[in-house]
Image (cartoon, rainbow, N blue to C red):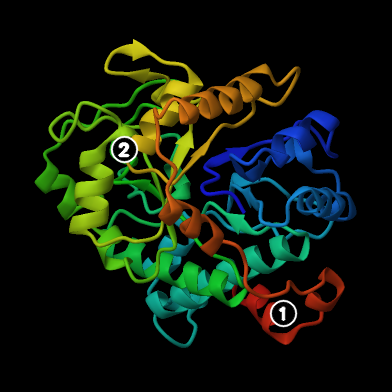
Amino acid sequence: MTEHAPLILDVAGTELTAADRRRLAHPLTGGVILFARNWENRAQLLQLTSSIKAVRDDLLICVDHEGGRVQRFRTDGFTHLPPMRALGELWMDDGKGAKAMPGSGALRATNAATASGYVLGAELRACGVDFSFAPVLDLDHGESGVIGDRAFHRDPRVVALLAKSVMHGLLQAGMANCGKHFPGHGFVKADSHTEVPVDNRSLKAILADDAAPYPWLSSTLTSVMPAHVIYPKVDSRPAGFSQRWLQDILRRQMRFDGAIFSDDLSMEGARRLDGQVVSYTEAAIAALAAGCDLVLLCNQSVGDGKAVDELIDGLDAALSKGKWQPSVDSESRRLALLPETLPQPWDDLMYQPAYLQALDLLP
């Protein structure tokens, strides 16, 4: 175990290359994020995840697997999970008329949300995946195309309760959770993958609305991912690079003590700090200094992977020069995200009563 392994990297294909193994073995690498290009079928995915663990068994194997349009694995038996908005709509359905069912819409929705989390977590874990960046806590303001139906609802109270139910399902499957994108990405139209969104609301307005689920869920959240959004009335830097947001507000004011991930450092919202274009290494150092425990670099291993090697080497050189400080607390937060139980094999899962019931409860 290293003193602090903050890097979450990707791999190029459906099996590890020599370059992948070299990068994953580096002591600064703490995990892997998988994408649809890393998927062919369940047997191949299990072989890939097993080969990653063979390099280092403490690597955290992650994926963006929320349901709806953000679901990396969709074939060979994986359940097509509903978008989170479907759970919000179920909450609002009073169940009158032809669709009448026992219990109120809200209570059925929380059951369905728990079922979604359990199916999501159990299927991923059966294939060797440790962790999913879910659920989305952004509010559905009807403005953001990149968030859209990934959000549960407009009301932060509904979002918090449905998200807590999804987290309960993930916990039943032995999987941690990640609330995103702190303090809220749903209000702005711009997509931080390609632009630098700006939210001009006051801190008071944001805390009362979009950020409200975070303190309500402080006892349940195991990790948080900040938004690559600038809130100029709070800080001139995006939230993921802001000590004010991460240390003063999230840690101290909201008392969050879990892991903080940066969002993808290759997104446009992470490439410009204080009006300047920065390197991946500079962005990583800024995120760590602001209070992130872990930093992601996605989709850069394809081709020669030069950007990945530059980040590893750059962060290593910066460490030797004292430009960033390793954190034992950050490393313990990373390790805490690893599952503590053995996964259920896929074939056994298919006959498990709790799993079959969860499938029936999905909207």
Task: Look at label 2 and name its amino acid.
Answer: Ala
Q: Pointer 2: what residue?
A: 290
Can residue 144 be seen here? no
Q: Position of residue 53 (x, y in %)?
A: 76, 53
Q: CA distance from mark 2 to mark 1?
A: 44 Å
Q: Nearer the viewer, residue 228 or 321?
A: 321
Q: Residues within 10 Å of mark 2 (few under 14, many from 20)?
A: some
- Please, is residue 79 above or below residue 68 in the view? below
Task: Look at label 1 and name its amino acid.
Answer: Leu
- Please, is residue 183 above or below residue 267 in the view? below
Task: Kindly identify the residue that appears in the image at 28 percent across and 39 percent down.
Answer: 187
Can residue 167 be seen here? yes
- Please, is residue 14 above or below residue 101 in the view? above
Secondary structure at badge 2 equals helix
- Please, is residue 115 above or below residue 250 in the view? below
Q: Which tag is nearer the camera, tag 2 or tag 1?
A: 2
Q: Position of residue 170 (x, y in %)?
A: 56, 69
Q: Position of residue 96 (x, y in %)?
A: 41, 77
Tell whether 165 sits left or right of 302.
Answer: left
Residue 44 is tagged as none
Q: Nearer the viewer, residue 200 or 333?
A: 333
Image quarter hosting the C terminus: bottom right
> Which quadrant of the view contains residue 130?
bottom right
Q: Pointer 1: what residue?
A: 356
Secondary structure at badge 1 equals helix
Task: Kindly identify the residue that appears in the image at 82 percent across and 69 percent down.
Answer: 346
Task: Kindly identify the residue that appears in the image at 52 percent across and 28 percent down.
Answer: 315
> Which quadrant of the view contains residue 342?
bottom right
